[in-house]
Image (tube, rainbow, N blue to C red):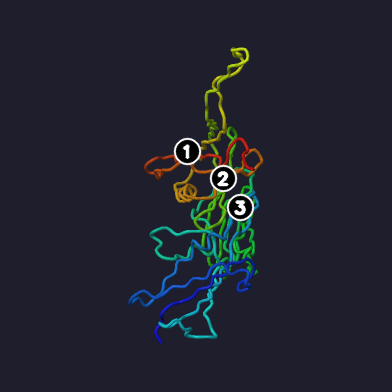
Amino acid sequence: MALGSVQVQLYIYSGTEGSYSEFDLKYTINKERLGTDSNIVLEVGELIRDYIDITFNNDYLCHSKWVSAVVYYKDLQGDLLDHSNPQVFNYIALDGYGFFEDQVNPELSRNALVTSDHMYLPEGTAGKLPIFAEGTGKVRIDSTDTQITDSGDSSQKIQYITIPANSSTIKVYDTDDTTIRKTIAVTNICEPKFTPYKIVFVNKYGAFENFFCFKKSVESFNVVNESYKSNTINHATVDYSTGAAQKQITNVNATTKITLNTGFVHEGMNSTLEELMISENVFILWEGKTLPIIPMTKSMTHKTHLNDKMINYTLDFEFAFDKINNIR
């Protein structure tokens, strides 16, 4: 019999694959086949994304979820084509994205969850490398191997491997432990004059990625308020005090901005900076606290060693909260 429509039940949950219950049912979608189309197309990415909550407190937690799509196929009259066996599809969901040229539903990296082959760390400082546990057998940092195990739980699908201070080379291997999928050169920067700032952002793979800015930083402060004129006259004495302000301000608050310079970097960091600028979740380690920030730089000209010799980028950020606490 001809396919007329489908009903899709979407379960979104934490834990292991297929371990959903009735309480994990988030959406029930019904859609009819259009005209002479042979397929019924559903877009569920944005629906699933509503249940992936991104928080960060320098803790590098995995925020992935399991998604089980239970599909019932119906004929043109709306009757089930198979009463007993709906088709079940299980997926691991990350808050990532593909670019236009990646086309429809691209599967991104299944091992190292960073784009660039270069990494910059302050001298004497450890780093973090996000990897996808399903597709990684081991990570070799210089001559030390870290074996990767996948328990199947959604909370460890993305694992953050510690990069020891002053490391030089990272190699990420496939599950066969012999095929190298990515090699990353680590440059350790000695910066005696300026304070390096660590930026952490959610990259295109849905993982937290570190990026350090090493050079000059400038902090600025912008105050906003409303004002009105007050009648200060004392009707009993038909006089007014010169100590009472006629112009009053109200609803005072402020925002803080910071301008950072990357320092000299390899042109291979252009892709990292792109992902940083379009990320919806960016944080900075600031005065011992992890604080959310918003990238304010809206354009970037790609620099190359051929055209620009030494490559430095200037980035503007705004702290993602008001200076005066108005959370009630």
Question: Relative to the observer, which residue lies in front, 107 or 189?
Answer: 107
Residue 208: image location, x then y, percent: 57, 53
| Image position of 19 (left or right of 203) | right
Q: CA distance from mark 1 to mark 3?
A: 26 Å
Work out which quarter of the rendered image holds the N terminus and state it: bottom left
Residue 256: image location, x then y, percent: 55, 35
- State the mark number for residue 199: 2
Q: Amino acid at mark 1?
A: Thr
Please tell me whether mark 2 or mark 3 is closer to you in this view: 3
Q: Residues within 10 Å of mark 1 (few under 14, many from 20)?
A: some
Which residue shows up at 59% across the image and 56% down it? 53
Outermost residue on the bottom side: it is: 1
Q: Amino acid at mark 3?
A: Thr
Q: Residues within 10 Å of mark 3 (few under 14, many from 20)?
A: some
Work out which quarter of the rendered image holds the C terminus and state it: top right
Q: Report which residue position mark 1 lands on.
A: 314
